[in-house]
Amino acid sequence: MIATTNTKPLDDVSLDTNSTSSMNGESFNDSPASSVSSGSIDTNHKSWMDSEIIEPHVGYKKVLVTGGAGFIGSHVAEELLARGDDVVIIDEINDYYDVRIKESNLKQLQDAYPEKGRVTIYRGDICDRDLMEKIFMNENPKWICHMAARAGVRPSIQDPFIYIHSNITATTLLMELSHKYGVENFVFASSSSVYGGSKSAFFSEDEVVDYPVSPYAASKKTCELLAYTYHHLYQLNVTGLRFFTVYGPGGRPDMAPFKFIDRVSRGVEMQQYGDGSSSRDYTYIDDIVDGVIRSIDRQHNYEVFNLGKGEGTSLKKFIGLVQKHVGKKAIIELLPDQPGDVPYTCADVAKAKHMLGYTSLIPFEEGIRRTAEWYKKTYAVDDNEAEIVEQEIIRSPVSKLEIMTVV
Ligand SMILES: NC(=O)c1ccc[n+]([C@@H]2O[C@H](COP(=O)([O-])OP(=O)(O)OC[C@H]3O[C@@H](n4cnc5c(N)ncnc54)[C@H](O)[C@@H]3O)[C@@H](O)[C@H]2O)c1
């Protein structure tokens, strides 16, 4: 069934992608100080092409993963543990979405690696200086994977201050402590949102990103600037990763891939803006984890990388694949294009390929198939059941977690 109306509120395709406004594409070097230049992009020569290729550090690491209860952090932690590294997680387990999902992520890690010292979990705010100081003293992590943040574009417009706190203050404190305790490499999550109002079809790290269009985007851009400052002042090795809409098993319930699969599975109406030809870059979680770990292993002085699929998928194709792999027809409400929507946005991943050896390996259809399969196993009563209770998000029981609240 297809209903048509123009009156419903916005319920966007991806809540972690960009809205748009005008912005010029200008040349950009890795030094933000030199990024405020004018002139057109030399498309044949990118600033990173002459950069030194860093050999990966091999061997054991103890990695502090902030936001390790969240979607990306828990997957990175899992991969680090699987290859033999030890992981220290700090997460406040906030209720931005169902906390049982986060508790379940932590429980899975603890169940898989019960040996003492493999995965150590602290619950608390990464802006709590005393707590963080104790974690650095007790655990002495030399490798930081900073994934904790308040994510989401629209909520940041409602409450910008929590984004300043959890994104900017937190990242500054972590870099301050990383400098103080001699951290080898500091890798943090930025976002494709920094491209804000860019008119480009392919977003490149060489673009000036001085025009963030939400507090969330501004907070990530600020973290990139501060990261450069910490590198400049203290030679801290820092890498910022601009993720492009990440999806997969365990994905965030506020984002389009989860929402589409969930709504089609439950026979709930969903919104399609425009004629379905607009296209976005969706990145499967395994590819992101690979890019994050490649960055942890390479101690770059200061770099920013796009981590995306490097290829767009149209909304029409996206919905078609969800229907195919869920095995049900979508109920679609057709809405006009949102003002300022651009037809095609995509990550230019040439720099990550060149300097990290990163390549996105999971085709979009395969990613959606795996995500739909995971959704069925996790949420559905059975394969043919259309009705599940909205609030009953996690069906698997969450047992008591061994979390260190006092250090
Ligand atoms: N998922 C995406 O598509 C996407 C896209 C671009 C950027 N990012 C960035 O990647 C990172 C991970 O995203 P995600 O999708 O896994 O989000 P997520 O919300 O699942 O995970 C973030 C975790 O950080 C924790 N956290 C937030 N503020 C905290 C604080 N002050 N102290 C301690 N813990 C805190 C949360 O409880 C949560 O578990 C974030 O920095 C996000 O901005 C994600």
Image: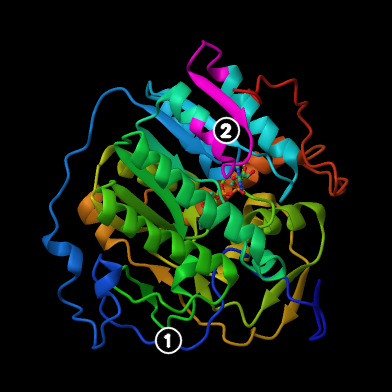
In the figure, is residue 347 to the left or right of 388? left
Quarter of the C terminus within the rendering = top right
Asked where in the image residue 124 lies, by quadrant, the reply is top right
Asked where in the image residue 205 lies, by quadrant, the reply is bottom left
Q: Residues within 10 Å of mark 2 (few under 14, many from 20)?
A: some
Q: In terms of sequence position, does the residue under pointer 1 or pointer 2 come before the other?
A: 1
Between the C-alphas of marks 1 and 2, the distance is 41 Å
Residue, far top: 115
Q: Position of residue 27 (x, y in %)?
A: 25, 79
In the rendered image, which residue does mark 1 sit on? 23
Choose between 273 and 230: the one closer to the eye. 230
Q: Nearer the viewer, residue 143 or 171?
A: 171
Ligand 1 near label 2 (Cβ, under 8 Å)? no
Relative placement, left or right, of 363 versus 350 is right
Is 288 a magenta residue? no
Mark 1, Cα crowd under 10 Å, few <14 / some 14-19 / many 20+, is some
Q: Which residues are magenta?
A: 112-133
Quadrant the N terminus occupies: bottom right
253 vs 194, left or right, is: right
x then y, percent, for residue 150: 61, 54
Q: What residue appears at the point 72 percent right and 69 percent down from the top-left corner?
A: 158
Please tell me whether mark 1 sits on a helix, a strand or a loop: loop
Q: Are marks 1 and 2 in contact (CB under 8 Å)?
A: no
Numbered label attached to residue 131: 2
Q: Is residue 246 visible?
A: no
